Image (cartoon, grey):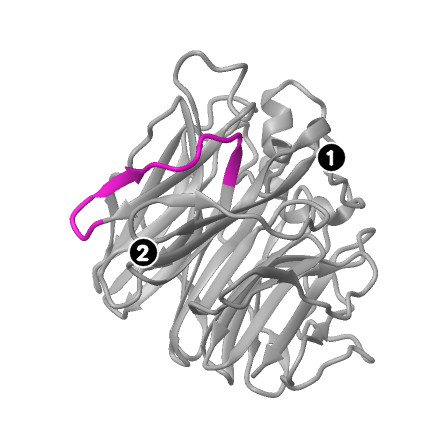
Amino acid sequence: MNLRHRFEARRPADPARNPRQRTVPGMLVVALAVAGVAVSTSARARPATASGVTPGDPRTTCTSGWQVQRRSGTPGALVAVAAAGAGDAWAVGSVGFGVPTRTLAMRWDGADWTVVASPNPSSMLDVLNGVAVLSARDAWAVGGAGAMSGITLSSLIEHWNGTGWTVVRARGPQELEAVVALSPSDIWAVGNSNVTSAAGPATTSSMHWTGTRWVSVPTVDPGAFNALSTLARIPRTDQLWAGGSTTARSGGTGPAGINPTPLIERWTGTRWTVVATPDIHGQVLGIAATGPADAWAVGEKDGAGGRIVPLVLHWNGQRWAQLPLPSPKAGLTAVVAPSVDDVWAVGNGTILHFDGTSWRTSPWPSPSGATLDGIGQARGSVWAVGWWDAAQPRPLVVASCS
C-alpha cells in the first residue's frame, strides 16, 4: 500500500524506475493480483532466526562518524528506527518476500542489536513499517497484516511493555505506515485504506491512542487517490505533520500513481488540514520538525529524462519551499532533525547532512548492495537502517554519535 520501495532492493536499485510502483512486498503481490498478473510466491521467504545473529557479524559501539553497527547475516530488512536514549533504540521491518512475510523487531541496548520476537497475527503477510519509543518499557510499532485475497489487509499495532511485544486490537485502515509518541497516553499513527486497484490507496487515515484505546481521527483526502507515508511531532506543541502524496480528482494524466503531487497535512490540535506545497510531481516520504517555524520534508520527484531525483522541502513557519541539494542516486525516504543546524536525510545508498547553511553528502562505509530506508536519533546518537546484499536483503544498521 505504501508507495515506498521497502523491499525492492531485492534487485539492484534503478534510479530511473517509477517510484509510484514502490510498495511493501505483500502489497506488490496484491497490486499485481488485482491487475490480473500471475504472481509466484515461492520460496524466497525465510523466517528470522531466534537470535538474528550470524557468527562474524560486525557490531560496533556508536562512535563519531558513520560506522556499520550491525550487518546481519540472516534475511530481513529494516525500514524504521526510533530511540528513547543512546542505549535504548528499536528498529522494525520484515522478513520474507511474498508469502509468508513476517515482522522483524531489533533492539539496541547500548552494546549490541538483537532480534526480539514480535507477533505475526496472520498466516501470510505481517509487516512493521513504523516504530516509536517512549522508554525501555513503552514502545509502539505499526504496520499491516492479513490474507492475500486481492485487496485485504488490516492494521497491525504492537506494544512493547518491557518484557514482550503484544498485538493491540483496533479497527483502523488497511495498513499503518508511521507512528509517533507524544506521551504514554498520546500516540498517533497514519495509514491508508480503500485500495481499489493496482494504482494504490484511495484514502488516508489517522489513529490516536488515548491511553486506553485507539480511535480513528479523520484526515483530509484532497484527491482521488491519496497516501500518507510519514508522521512527525512539532516539538513544544501538541501538533503534528504528516506527509505523502495525492492525485487530482479530475484532469489527471492517468491512474493514481501517475504524476502525484506532494501531500502535507497538519494536525492543529483539533483537526487535520492540508498545507499547500510547491506544484511539482513527486511525493513526501519523510518528515521532521525542530519547532513550529522549522520543519523538513523529503522524498522524490520527477526529473529530467524521466529520472527520479531527490526532493527536499523546508517549512519556515509560513510556507513550504523547495531547496536545492546534492544529487544522490535517487530519492530520499526519511529525515530526522536534532536541531536547526543538524538535519540528516537518507535514501537508497545515500546519507545527507544539513549544517544550517547547505546540504552535503556524508560519507559512510556502505556494504555491497546497501540501501538505507529509515533514520532516527536520541541524545547525540543517530541511527540509519535498511538492508544490504541486494540478492538476499539482510538487516543493516549504521550509527553516528557526537
27, 236: nearer the viewer: 236
- Label 2: which secondary element: strand
Q: Which mark is residue 16?
A: 1
Residue at (63% x, 32% y) in the render: 21
Residue 5 to residue 80: above or below:
above
Residue 397 falls in image quadrant: bottom right
Instruction: Give the residues in magenta.
Output: 268-283
The number of callouts visible is 2
Q: Residue furthest left?
A: 270
The location of residue 228, given as percent across then percent down, is 42, 41
Question: Is label 2 in contact with label 1 (beta carbons under 8 Å)?
Answer: no
Name the N-terminal-most of marks 2 and 1.
1
Q: Main secondary structure of the magenta part?
A: loop
**Residue 105 visible in rendering:** yes
**230 to the left or right of 16:** left
Task: State the image coordinates of residue 153 (x, y, percent, origin top left).
Answer: 47, 38
Q: Is residue 158 above or below residue 7?
A: below
Give amino acid for label 1. Ala
Cα distance, mark 2 to mark 1?
34 Å
Q: Nearer the viewer, residue 122 or 329?
A: 329
Residue 381: image location, x then y, percent: 53, 79
Question: Measured along the vertical axis of the image, is residue 125 above or below residue 48?
Answer: above
94 left or right, relative to 182: right
Residue assigned mark 2: 188
**Was residue 198 drawn as part of the magenta stretch in this picture?**
no
* Residue at x 31% of width, y 58% of height: 293
Query: From this viewpoint, which residue is outermost toward the top?
Result: 251
Task: Identify the element where label 1 is drawn.
Answer: loop
Q: Is residue 44 visible?
A: no
Q: Is 276 colored magenta in this rendering?
A: yes
